[in-house]
Image: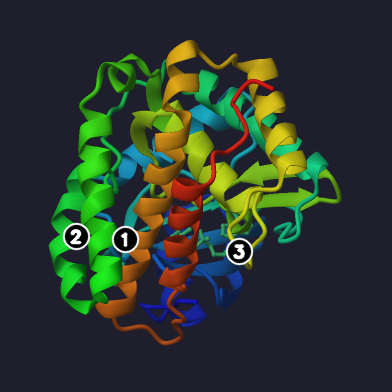
Amino acid sequence: MAVFTSVTLGDLTQWIKQFPLGQAVALKGIASGIENSNFFLTTESGEYVLTIFENLSFEQLPFYLELMHHLAERGVLVPAPVATHDGELIVPLHGKPAAIVSKLEGSSQMAPQPAHCAAVGTMLARMHLAAQDYPLEQPNLRGLDWWNLTTPKVLPYLSAENAHLLRAEMHFQEAFAGCDTYRQLQRGPVHADLFRNNVMFVGERLTGFFDFYFAGCDTWLFDVAVTINDWCIDLATGVLDTARVRAMLDAYHAVRPFTDAEQTAWQPMLRAAALRFWLSRLYDYYQPREAEMLTPHDPTHFERILRERIATPAPELRG
Ligand SMILES: Nc1ncnc2c1ncn2[C@@H]1O[C@H](COP(=O)(O)OP(=O)(O)OP(=O)(O)O)[C@@H](O)[C@H]1O
Ligand SMILES: N[C@@H](CCO)C(=O)O
């Protein structure tokens, strides 16, 4: 987990009155996640998730909360933010921004089969299309600029071999981001962190995408690559499982067909998606923040995936 900020039920007695939810009757810290402080909150009107944002500001947060609202209105399955009596989605709690969203049914599917991957592919394509007319703009804050800022901060901790890999991949990705094919890729709001632990299922029925707090405007293909790199691999080796890859890509393609430029960009984009999480995990590992319960994610997992994507071509986008 992470509860970085402690909250008690007593702290909410007055605070909750600004929401049309009745009294808070139970509060439980959630022991997973590494970015925010999350709590299951039961009130007189139902079950919710309370999030205190540890890194995102009041200025940045409307992008995420309004996006969830926009998607929910268009039938994409995501938690619906609850507004205060004054119509606010983000309010301070212990001096930090906080929000309440509806609790999704089900649990994460940590051993996905092709049917789960197909459901994720379909909903991801629907999400990209539904977000096309979303009016707010914010770049992906974990995009190339952030990689450039972070690389020198983690390089001193790396072995010579890994430092070489990181430098070489950064050069490769700089060139990729500057090429004509990259410029032709379709863009819009993307989730950018759609891992197994950020999707709920009841059996094979997908009940929602959540944790939109890394969302930003980026290429749709980057979102697909991030998702494939987590859902469709053997976790021990990072090797792609063709049946799951095909299920996800075919389902996505059936809703929002892949373009020729995306086909060309596919292999480098899978490497970009691996690099992004290698870097963030290295950063979190070597520069940890205070938390009551915090287990940093293993950076070597994404080092392995990056090496594997460089060594072995993935299945084509269009089967
Ligand atoms: N809307 C929701 N409905 C049901 N459960 C939720 C919801 N939001 C969060 N959770 C639960 O809280 C846990 C942590 O939430 P979340 O993944 O958003 O945390 P985080 O700190 O942003 O973490 P990370 O970015 O590392 O995934 C989830 O694994 C899930 O069990
Ligand atoms: N999904 C990220 C954590 C941040 O949400 C990771 O596995 O590194």
Say which residue label 1 marks.
279
Q: Secondary structure at mark 1?
A: helix
Is residue 193 visible in the rendered image? The answer is: no
- Whether pointer 2 and pointer 1 mark residues with C-beta atoms closer than 8 Å, the reply is yes
Residue most extreme to the bottom: 292
Marked residue nearer the N-terminal end (3 or 1): 3
Q: Is residue 20 above or below residue 314?
A: below
180 left or right, relative to 74: left
270 left or right, relative to 88: right
Say which residue label 2 marks.
150
Q: Residues within 10 Å of mark 3 (few under 14, many from 20)?
A: few
Q: CA distance from mark 2 to mark 1?
A: 7 Å
- Whether pointer 3 and pointer 1 mark residues with C-beta atoms closer than 8 Å, the reply is no
Which amino acid type is marked by label 2?
Thr
Say which residue label 3 marks.
237
Q: Is mark 2 within 8 Å of ligand 2?
A: no
Q: Which mark is residue 189?
A: none
